[in-house]
Image (tube, rainbow, N blue to C red):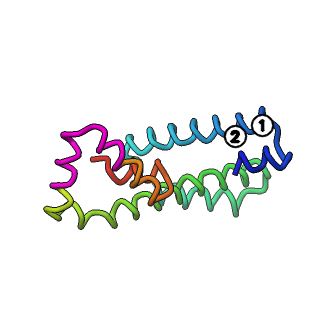
């Protein structure tokens, strides 16, 4: 999208670079938060964010509530997605496939890239495959 925006003249290169770098930093931060296993805080975050959003009189607190709700929904979604892959852990075919990839780093990177393309999110891929 960003390349298309630059090509259409809607953004300049500096703005496009800022968007791309921001997306990379955001993905890195999301992956780190996933590593901290804070999915148990997803529902409380949604509740706190909703409380701030709907019961605060200050605009700043409304925006803070929106941010907290967003993070809560993000981690709730990742947790639900990770839970949907639990039956695959018991599949011997799935386990053997990953064992095969562990012997060949090139195939492991290729499999990770394909999984990320299918899911459309590297953060979701990290959340699914982490222990």
Kindly identify the residue that appears in the image at 78 percent across and 56 percent down.
57
- Contact, mark 2 vs mark 1 (Cβ under 8 Å): yes
Q: Which residue is at 17% across, 62% downward?
A: 93
Secondary element type, mark 1: helix
Q: Which residue lies furthest to the right in this view?
A: 9
Q: Is residue 102 magenta?
A: yes
Say whether residue 122 is left or right of residue 97: right
Residue that numbered label 1 is attached to:
15
Which span of residues is magenta-colored? 96-111
**In this rendering, would 34 be left or right of 25?**
left
- Secondary structure found at label 2: helix
Between the C-alphas of marks 2 and 1, the distance is: 6 Å
Q: Where is residue 90 in the image (x, y as percent from the top left)?
A: 17, 63
Q: Is residue 90 left or right of residue 49?
A: left
Location of residue 71 in the rendering, given as x and y in whole percent from the top left corner:
55, 52
Residue 47 sits in quarter: bottom right
Question: Measuring 59% from the left and 57% from the top, which residue is drawn there?
Answer: 69
Q: Quick one: 29 or 24, which is closer to the camera?
A: 24
- Where residue 118 sits, quadrant-wise, is bottom left
**54 and 104: which one is in front?**
104
Give x and y (percent) for residue 127: 39, 50
Q: Nearer the viewer, residue 14 or 44?
A: 14
Provide the residue designation for mark 2: 19
């Amino acid at each position: 999208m960003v390349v298309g925006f630059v090509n259409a003249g809607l953004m300049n290169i500096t703005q496009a670079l800022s968007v791309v770098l921001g997306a990379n930093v955001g993905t890195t931060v999301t992956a780190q938060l996933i590593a901290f296993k804070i999915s148990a805080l997803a529902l409380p975050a949604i509740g706190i964010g909703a409380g701030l959003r709907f019961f605060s009189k200050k605009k700043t607190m409304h925006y803070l509530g929106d941010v907290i709700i967003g993070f809560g929904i993000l981690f709730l979604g990742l947790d639900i997605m990770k839970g949907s892959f639990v039956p695959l852990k018991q599949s011997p075919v799935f386990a053997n496939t990953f064992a095969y990839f562990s012997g060949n780093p090139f195939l492991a990177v290729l499999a990770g890239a394909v999984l990320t393309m299918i899911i459309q999110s590297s953060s979701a891929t990290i959340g699914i495959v982490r222990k």
